[in-house]
Image (cartoon, rainbow, N blue to C red):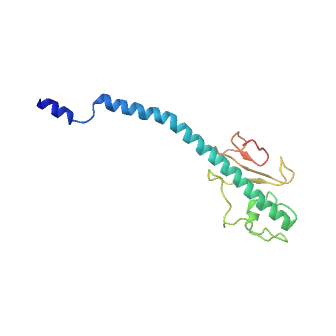
């Protein structure tokens, strides 16, 4: 009788603990990939939006200055006048250029290889140019 009351208050059995761990592992297998996929999709969407925002700033620069910044002037021309008549910036609200969601600088080339005016892109998650995860203003299948 005494041994039964000690067993009742002893806590969980090894089988009960293993069952709980198995349930938690099964939930992790289901939930973690879904959360990971959403994070990746959210960063891609943020990069696409960042490119769109910079495109609007570049269009305003072009309206004021009758041209887009050169590759050498780069996106910095949206913050600081590169010595162009008609410049009415800064065209970007913050003091520094926005970074992509992976904390890399957006890339800019004018004239562009894909667009006559300019190319604008992010290296994507891997941070390497020319790979399949690049996010660009010349492909809309992101």
Lateral position of residue 6 relative to residue 101, left or right = left
Image quadrant containing the C terminus: top right
Q: Position of residue 110 (x, y in %)?
A: 82, 55
Residue drawn at x 47%, y 35% as measured from the top left: 27
Residue 2 found in image quarter: top left
Between 81 and 90, the one lying in front of the other is: 90
Lateral position of residue 77 relative to residue 19, left or right = right
Residue 55 found in image quarter: bottom right
Q: Position of residue 71 (x, y in %)?
A: 80, 57
Residue drawn at x 73%, y 63% as measured from the top left: 76
Whether residue 73 is visible: no
Q: Position of residue 59 (x, y in %)?
A: 81, 60
Residue drawn at x 55%, y 37% as measured from the top left: 33
Q: Position of residue 93 (x, y in %)?
A: 69, 66
- In this view, the residue farthest toward the left is 2
Vertical side of 4 occupied by 97: above or below = below
């Amino acid at each position: 009788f005494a041994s039964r009351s000690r067993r009742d208050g002893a806590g969980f059995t090894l089988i009960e603990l293993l069952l709980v761990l198995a349930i938690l592992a099964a939930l992790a297998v289901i939930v973690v990939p879904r959360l990971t996929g959403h994070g990746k999709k959210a960063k891609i969407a943020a990069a696409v939006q960042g490119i769109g925002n910079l495109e609007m700033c570049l269009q305003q620069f072009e309206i004021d200055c009758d041209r887009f910044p050169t590759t050498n002037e780069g996106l910095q021309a949206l913050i600081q006048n590169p010595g162009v008549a008609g410049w009415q910036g800064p065209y970007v609200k913050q003091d520094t250029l926005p970074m992509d969601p992976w904390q890399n600088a957006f890339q800019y080339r004018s004239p562009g290889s894909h667009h006559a005016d300019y190319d604008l892109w992010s290296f994507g998650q891997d941070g390497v140019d020319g790979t399949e995860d690049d996010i660009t203003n010349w492909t809309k299948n992101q």
